[in-house]
Image: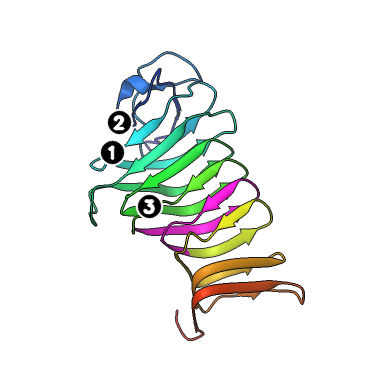
Amino acid sequence: HNWTFGESRYWVAPAAGNWMDPGNWSKTSGGPAPASVPKSIDTAVFDAGSSADCHIQHNDQVEILVASVTSNYAGVLFIHGPPGFDYLNSFELDAGVFFLGGGTVRIDGCPYFSIYQFFSQTGGWFDGGRDYYWSNINSFSLYGGTFTAPPDVSIRSWYHVGGVFDHNQGFVDFFSVNSVDIPGEETFYNLRMYSPNVSLSEEDKIICLNMFYYNTHST
């Protein structure tokens, strides 16, 4: 067999720059550049090695295994999209994980944002933006920080035990989810539920401010 293993790439840009520029990446934290841009089997790390903002432009195709934004990263990861609805831009984590421990991730009109496995946030701010786009998160866990939801997000597994969930006046869809764990009280703006397995105790509460849809027969 010819085995191919992924590597870690660290954001080391001296100033605000583009994701696709090899001069902004290193094989070690704070180490020398250039290095190859993270690819579908790699881990992209944002830590104390650089405090510069990172921009993914509307015509960039970003496909990585793991994205890790640590509490030591003082910059902003911007994911830009063009005006309107265009699939030229995508941010995908193939069978991977998005760790957000600090810093800021901001979606700016990106029409497609997908995490095929796990999104885990312990700090920082995930800003889903206001421009409409479709997004998918397979497993969502919020332990700390602030998660400002994308305008329309599909989630299969939901776990919220800490931090702030901001509904952002958007849609949250639970499609045939594995589990929805609501600790205490959760407020959504628009909520669509398709055959979810919802875990609620007597003290737990789901609040929907605008539209609620529930279908037990969807698959």
**What color scheme is it?**
rainbow
Q: Nearer the viewer, residue 182 or 40?
A: 182
Residue 41 visible? The answer is no
Q: Quadrant of the C terminus?
A: bottom left
142 and 190: which is toward the camera: 190
Residue 148 falls inside the magenta stretch = yes
Q: Amino acid at mark 1?
A: Gln
Going 33% across and 41% down the picture, which residue do you hit?
62
- Residue that extends furthest to the bottom in the rendered view of this protein: 217
- Judging from the image, what secondary structure is the residue with disc 1 in? loop
Q: Which residues are magenta?
A: 133-154
Q: CA distance from mark 2 to mark 3?
A: 17 Å
Q: x and y percent of residue 14 in the render?
A: 40, 17
Place of residue 26 in the rendered image (x, y in percent of width and height, measured from the top left): 42, 20
Relative to 93, does residue 192 appear above or below in the rendering?
A: below
Indicate which disc, 2 or 3, sits on the residue closer to the N terminus: 2
Which dot, 3 or 1, sits closer to the camera?
A: 1
**Amino acid type, mark 3:** Phe
Mark 2 Cα within 10 Å, few/some/many (few <14, many 20+)? some
Q: Which residue is mark 3?
A: 113
Residue sticking out furthest to the top:
32
Q: Residue at x 47, y 15 (%)?
A: 31
First reached walking from the N terminus: tag 3 or tag 1:
1
Closer to the eye: label 2 or 1: 1
- Give the residue type that dot 2 points to: Met
- Quadrant in the picture for residue 141: bottom right
Q: Is residue 56 above or below residue 11?
A: below
Distance in Å between CA atoms under marks 2 and 1: 9 Å
Residue 20: image tag: 2
Q: Main secondary structure of the magenta part?
A: strand
Residue under numbered circle 1: 57
